[in-house]
Amino acid sequence: MERPDGRIARANVPKQCNHCADAPCVKVCPTGASYRAEDGTVQIDQDRCIGCKYCMAACPYQVRYQVETGEVQKCTFCHHRTGVGLLPACVGTCVGYARTFGDLNDPESDISKRLAEANGGDVLYEDLGLNPSLYYIGLKETEAMPVASAIHRGGNVMKPYEG
């Protein structure tokens, strides 16, 4: 997309687990391996996962995957890091500072301040009512941009580029 200044604009919408408050993956898990942790994130207890893939089918974001041993995995918001006060790796290593992490219930947190500055954020598939914890700033504008590449979901080409 060409911007008013003549430069080309490009945008990516990274897809990852949205750690929904009303997560369908948790509801369909027959063993309770998928669960909401005390901190509000959606986690998987690998010892309880039987690899049935119900959670993979239920996830509207299609971000779960099965490993060679049969268990299902996904983004954990680096639960092993955040549990000891560190940032998730994707946030700490983002050279463009496009990612922010924190407590949405704390108005003084970096994420709350950033969302306030942007007059709130958008969520993917808002119409599903899952109450995701992942917000995008400028999502509606990004989705309105002309598509200039194939659209991928879950590693699969959902719509080939027709440009």
Image (cartoon, rainbow, N blue to C red):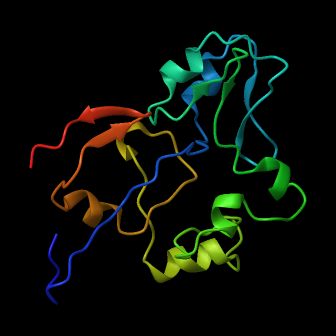
The image shows residue 81 at horizontal and vertical percentages of: 83, 56
Reply above or below: 154 against 106.
above
Residue located 71% across and 19% down the image? 71
Quarter of the image holding residue 18?
A: top right
Image quarter of the N terminus: bottom left
> 97 or 134, which is in the foreground?
97
Residue located 58% across and 21% down the image? 55
Reply above or below: 35 against 119.
above
> 36 or 72, which is in the foreground?
72
Relative to 138, 38 lies left or right:
right
Residue located 54% across and 54% down the image? 134
Quarter of the image holding residue 54?
A: top right
Residue located 14% across and 86% down the image? 6
Q: Residue furthest right?
A: 84
The image shows residue 41 at horizontal and vertical percentages of: 71, 45
Relative to 98, 11 lies left or right:
left
The image shows residue 106 at horizontal and vertical percentages of: 71, 71
> 90 or 53, which is in the foreground?
90
